[in-house]
Image (cartoon, rainbow, N blue to C red):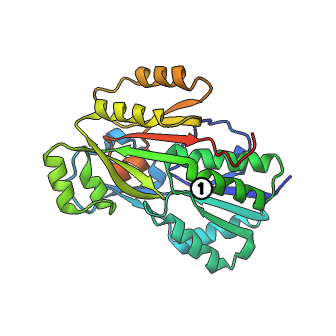
Amino acid sequence: MSNIAIITDSTAQFPNPSFAGKDFVRLIPFDILLDGVIYKEGHDLKASDFPLNLKSNSDPKLIIPTASEIAELFSVLLRKYDELFVIVNSADLTPVYQNAVDAVKIIQGGTAVLVINSMTISSGLGILVQTSAELVSKGAIMADIERQIRQLIPHIYTLICSPSLRYLHNNGVIESQQALIGEYLNLHPIFSLEEGRPNALYKVRNFRHAQDFYQEFIEEFDELTHISLLKGTNTQGIDNRLLRQFVQENFPDTPFSEHRLNSFLATLFGPKSLGLIVIEKPFTLSG
């Protein structure tokens, strides 16, 4: 069996908590600054603890491990594993990807550590991690894992609807003026991750209209391998049963998972967010 560890970060959410190869997965843990208090690895913190509207530009913030701290983690893991396959959230959302790349240089990891920008987050990242771990459990070598993951990444589509625009401003997604005006007008913009970069796709009046948009988005695909709904706090007007029924009728063989927005995602997008992640079948792969 391959002696490879799969490394991801705290924003990953797993549709199947008991996936094959789970024992090979390790986390780069994030901390969270909220109301001047640092919560180590987000413990004792959930999305409902976050204010719906921000008045500060200083927090909440994700505290991402530095390159030196990640290098120390890699060094410890390389005492047990021959190789590390590192796949983290989009490089345009947090600096963890760049810090991991710099960490490899610090330890002179060379070919022993491979760092991948997933260009997604949450269950999109979780699916990539699960896929990688399952490949390791089947004895796949690093080159095969990299090839399959790189083929899968372009087929993951990530949408986030959030009226908590000050959160998006704090994380560099939009300008301050846009956030102030958008919140004043109670806008619900939908952002897509285009090659990992947040891009304003559409504006809706409320979360019910966002769910309608998500359903129309799903309808554009012929074959999907997974559909995930990410649900934050105060998402009034959302009836998950309607979307689930639509998926069951139109994609009966496609798994559908629902995820509560965790504290790390709430820090990035605000607690009042609704997300959709769909994975299209990568037709270049067999099976």
Residue 172 location, x and y as percent? 32, 63
Q: How many marks?
A: 1
Residue 147 location, x and y as percent? 71, 58
- Residue type marked 1: Thr
Location of residue 9 (image quadrant): bottom right
In the rendered structure, the answer to whether residue 190 lies left or right of residue 63 reads left
Residue at the (47%, 58%) spot, across then down: 196
In the rendered structure, the answer to whether residue 68 lies left or right of residue 94 reads right
Tell me, yes or no, if residue 59 can be seen here: no
Residue 110 location, x and y as percent? 72, 76
Location of residue 170 (image quadrant): bottom left
In front of the other: 135 or 252: 252
In front of the other: 101 or 67: 101
Tell me, yes or no, if residue 197 can be seen here: yes
| Above or below, 51 relative to 144 | above
| Above or below, 243 relative to 286 | above
Locate the C terminus and report the quarter of the image it occupies: top right
Label 1 secondary element: strand
Residue at the (61%, 72%) spot, across then down: 71
In the rendered structure, the answer to whether residue 266 lies left or right of residue 279 reads left
Residue 123 location, x and y as percent? 53, 43
Residue beneath disc 1: 8
Residue at the (32%, 35%) spot, across then down: 210
| Above or below, 108 relative to 135 | below
Q: Residues within 10 Å of mark 1 (few under 14, many from 20)?
A: many
